[in-house]
Amino acid sequence: MFKRGALFALGCTSLMAARVESQTSIAERDLSAAYRTYAAQFTDIGYALPLANGSLIVADFGEMTLTRLDGRTGAARSVGRKGSGPKEYQVAGQLLRLPGDTIAMYDAAQLRMLLVTSDGEPIRTVTLSTDRRELLNLPQAFATDARGRIYAHVFARPVGAARDSATSRIDVVRMQNFTSSKYDTLATLWFERLPLLRKPLADSQTLRVSVNLTSFSPSDAAVVTRDGTLRVLRGDEYRVEFIDENGMRQREVRVPGARYPLMPEEQSQIVQNTRDRTAKGTAHARRLLDARTPMPRVVIEEPDEWPAKKPYFQPGARLSDNGWLYIPVSCAEPDRQCLDVLNPEGVRHTRYRLPKHARFVTASDQFVFVVLRDDDDLETVVAYRAK
């Protein structure tokens, strides 16, 4: 028979062993059968925004179009119309949800926001600036809350010795509207400044550009709840900070994670993907610009040095209305994406392994939306039930 002290010691040993196990091995679960695969095909999905009525608004960066996927029937419908009129757009960009399920889309070509209803009907446009150089210095909106307040990034220089000289600072600010000149700073994000080689080749119309590895360096990120509080993801240790409406940190939760090595086959795929995206972007730019406008030929090359490991998490974290946080991360298997699902308290509920050639795009209270790329290099949206 064990004595009480021995039982207590045994229990503590087992608990410690369990904690060590949770820190060193992370169980990965495959997503269950898809709820729906939408028939519409896209070239390069940049943003997807779930609406309260179950529909999904998709911005295709390849074709620069906006599409509404019906949540009930799955049917696809074009949103808005191309042009420079008061209710038209030229390029599809960042999507934001405003009160009443109104959608705001950033049109970078015309420096303005297009507002549309949840049914996809254009309402009006809001001009952000008439000077492109001025716009680059304005806060860059990335989220909204239930009251319609705007949350944006403001790029700033490093201050003091908070981080080493290889990092840059982004402030997360809150504004009352898109054109407001006043804002409140709520949090600070840090990211590594990685050099991007831009060097002309034999002629002035050709550029040699190295692969941008910024997304493969440990960087911070922020998501906004509907009530206006923040969840800040810290890339150095994989932890979640809870920030209140006044920018005060309330608490933090560390998430067990691992930094997997960046394999040679992944490096080759990164280079190829960059070349493909550059070719698509160049082709679309030529369609927008006058045929006589000179455009340089861009040659994508490998960087001088690859990072040894991938970061804890990847860009693209999303927060559902019910407070569950979805964070794309690397899987143990190379060249495959996983998805960490954290409950409203910041504790990981599960880690899903996405299908091959798939990436996470967004989530709602009911569904997880994944983009699946086929052999013809076309993309479709697949919805899975959120567990």
Image (tube, rainbow, N blue to C red):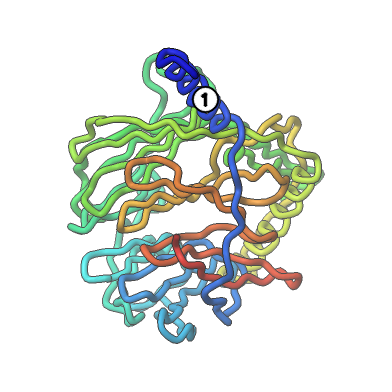
Amino acid type, mark 1 = Ser
Quadrant, the C terminus: bottom left
The image quadrant of residue 139 is top left
Is 322 rendered above or below residue 23?
Answer: below
Along the horizontal axis of the image, is 84 left or right of 118? right
Give the x, y percent position of residue 17: 55, 25
Which is nearer the eye, 287 or 105?
105
Q: Secondary structure at mark 1?
A: helix
- Residue shown at 30%/42% (left/top)? 230
Is 120 rendered above or below residue 250?
Answer: below
Along the horizontal axis of the image, is 371 left or right of 324? right
Number of numbered labels in the structure image:
1
Q: Residue furthest front?
A: 1
Along the horizontal axis of the image, is 383 left or right of 144? right
Is 108 rendered above or below residue 240?
Answer: below
- Residue shown at 55%/34% (left/top)? 257
Give the x, y percent position of residue 97: 31, 64
- Residue shown at 26%/64% (left/top)? 98
Which is nearer the eye, 83 or 50?
50
The image quadrant of residue 101 is bottom left
- Residue shown at 30%/36% (left/top)? 242
Which is nearer the eye, 150 or 71?
71
Along the horizontal axis of the image, is 113 left or right of 177? right
Give the x, y percent position of residue 56: 42, 72
* Label 1 sits on residue: 14
